[in-house]
Image (spheres, rainbow, N blue to C red):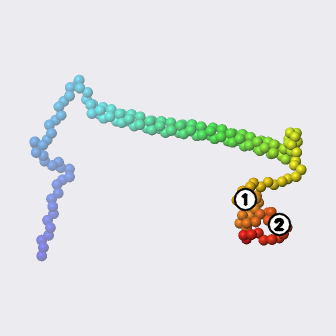
Amino acid sequence: MSVPAQPLSRPDRGAVPERDPSEIPAPAPRRSAAEPAVRRPAARARRTRRHHVGFALFASLVVGGIVFGIVVLNVLLAQAAFRLEAAQRAVSELSQEHVELVREQATLSAPGRIAAWAIRRGMRLPDDIRILHAPGEGQADPAGADPSSGTSPSDSARSDGGEVPGT
């Protein structure tokens, strides 16, 4: 059989472990009345204050930059709106001018006005109309001819009813 386990001895929790006398720190030297007694907390407070000032400066620069950017964006949008309004006004004026010019062109090209102008200048309609053909080997098809069929309007009006050569 086995032997029962022996209980471990536990040190008291409140007891201070023994130290070697060489490990005990020496007492701090006493300060004179001329030296300030609170040196470290002042330095720490100064450092903390410096961090707060730096953060406040950084935050104000960031917020100021954002506000400046918003103002610049607003100015650019206002300028674009003014340019757009000026362009719309110009388009409106030009379209109105176009309507007036089309109306004037229609008035000037009216057949009655052109006929009256021609009569005032001594022009008249011809008594008979003759078509002149230029001499040459290759004769072009007259206006209105169908080039794919090889016929012209004058061919269809032939009195003999014959076939056109080449068809």
The image position of residue 94, as x and y in percent, is: 71, 41
As helix, strand or loop, the secondary structure at mark 2 comes to: loop
Mark 2 belongs to which amino acid? Arg
Q: Residue at x 71, y 59 (%)?
A: 137
Q: Could you tell me how far apart the alpha carbons at marks 2 and 1 are, in whole angstroms?
A: 18 Å
Can you name the residue that lies furthest to the bottom here? Answer: 1
Q: Is residue 118 left or right of residue 34?
A: right
Res 124 quadrant in image: top right
Q: Residue at x 54, y 37 (%)?
A: 71
Res 49 quadrant in image: top left
Can you name the residue that lies furthest to the top here? Answer: 34
Q: Residue at x 87, y 40 (%)?
A: 122
In front: 6, or 52? 52
In front: 140, or 76? 140
Q: Is residue 51 left or right of residue 33?
A: right
The image position of residue 15, as x and y in percent, is: 18, 49
In front: 125, or 6? 125
Q: Which residue is mark 1?
A: 139
The image position of residue 160, as x and y in percent, is: 84, 69
Quadrant of the image for the N terminus? bottom left
Q: Which residue is mark 2?
A: 158
Tell me the crowding category of disc 1: few under 14, some 14 to 19, or many 20 or more residues within 10 angstroms, Cα based: few
Q: How many marks?
A: 2
Mark 1 belongs to which amino acid? Gln
Give the answer, above or below, for where 5 lies relative to 51: below
